[in-house]
Image (tube, rainbow, N blue to C red):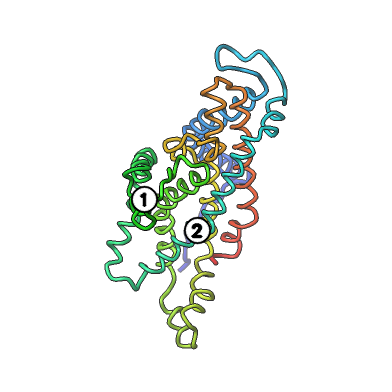
Amino acid sequence: MASHSSAVPVLPAPAQNRDRVRRDFNQALTVTVFLLPAGLIFTVFLIFPIVQAAYFSLFKWNGLGPPENFIGLENYLRLFQDKVFRGALLHNLLIIFLSLGVQLPISLGLALLVWRKLPGRVFFRTVFFLPYVLSEVITGIIWLFIYHPEFGLVTTLFKSLLPGLTTSWLGDPRTALNAIFVVLCWKYFGFYLILYLAGLQQIPAELEEAARIDGASDAQVLRYVILPLLGSILRLTIYLSILGSLQIFVLVWVMTQGGPVQSSNTMATYLFKFGFQRFALGYGSTVAVVLFLIGLGFSAAYQRAVLQQDYVGGVG
């Protein structure tokens, strides 16, 4: 008896090509339809303002009416010759240095503390994260009372330790920026702590136990096991900390408005003062463009040099 096998019809080559082209077209159309709203929002609210600011920076313009007084790169030359702007840039760099040297290590230390060993660690995680939930305006107002030169909590504590001490923490050029950094550290360390905890929870306990069986001390376990496996999170928090330090505005403006005597100015407060308050929108646009280029340049360089390790070589 002859066996009959069901034969699968094979389309001619031109028909296969048309089918593939139609399938690729439908796939591309679907992707375009889903990306179009996001792309439109991205263009209108990000790309267009950047291009517009770059255009306005070439004019001496007060924001009233169309810009007509074209001055080329004169705003940029004025900007980098201004001592106040250079001081604001240095303040941003100081905040970056303090964030990397103080804020992130504190967050990492507390994350290691509440990771496994501390009783009631769930409670402490919640308490440490609470400051991050507060808005920056509310945080600034709270700390204005804490730093009050007469009845503030900090002033009262220091007077009890050093009788006769009279200082205005936010009114003294020598202490204003450091006082603001304390507030920044208090508000944001909980955010980084949660990121570190998320990374620590991905580390298998067996690796730590194996290292201890081999005779590793706590410091050696931390250095050779935990920190390398936490590398991707460390790199991410450094990246976010630097970008955040470059863009800081609200807390500084609420607490000192960049004073006293420009001692706590940042690039963002400088932009607001010399751009909006003085109706020099052309010059303010120049500050915005420079701030954008600094952030973009750092972001591109850091991601290329550091963050791509997480995709090429894996975590750690």
Give me the residue at 65% from left, 13% from top.
68
Q: Quadrant of the N terminus?
A: bottom left
Residue sitting farthest toward the front:
164
Q: Residue 47 in the image: x percent, y percent?
A: 57, 31
Q: Which mark is residue 116?
A: none
Q: How many marks?
A: 2
For marks 2 and 1, the one nearer the N-term is: 2
- What residue did someone put label 1 on? 154
Q: Residue 180, image x and y in percent?
A: 46, 45
Which residue is depicted at the point 48% across and 66% down?
2
Cβ–Cβ under 8 Å for marks 2 and 1: no
Please identify the quarter of the rendering in which residue 114 is found.
bottom left
Residue located at (43% from left, 45% from top): 167
Q: Is residue 157 above or below residue 87?
A: below
Q: Which of the two residues, 50 or 104, is positioned nearer the viewer here?
A: 104
Q: Is residue 199 above or below residue 170?
A: below
Q: Check disc 2 and give the amino acid type.
A: Val
- Residue 246: quadrant of the picture: top right
Q: Which image quarter holds the C terminus? A: bottom right
- Where does residue 242 sit, x and y in percent of width and height? 55, 50
**Residue on which disc 2 sits:** 102
The answer to whether 58 is drawn above or below residue 99 in the figure is above
Q: Secondary structure at mark 1?
A: helix
Q: Residues within 10 Å of mark 1 (few under 14, many from 20)?
A: some
Foreground of the two, 194 or 181: 181
* Residue 158 percent location from the top left of the image: 38, 54
Specify the amino acid type for callout 1: Val
Label 2: which secondary element: helix
Tell us which disc is closer to us: 2 or 1: 1
Q: CA distance from mark 2 to mark 1?
A: 20 Å
Instruction: Determine the residue positioned at 51% across, 75% down.
Output: 225
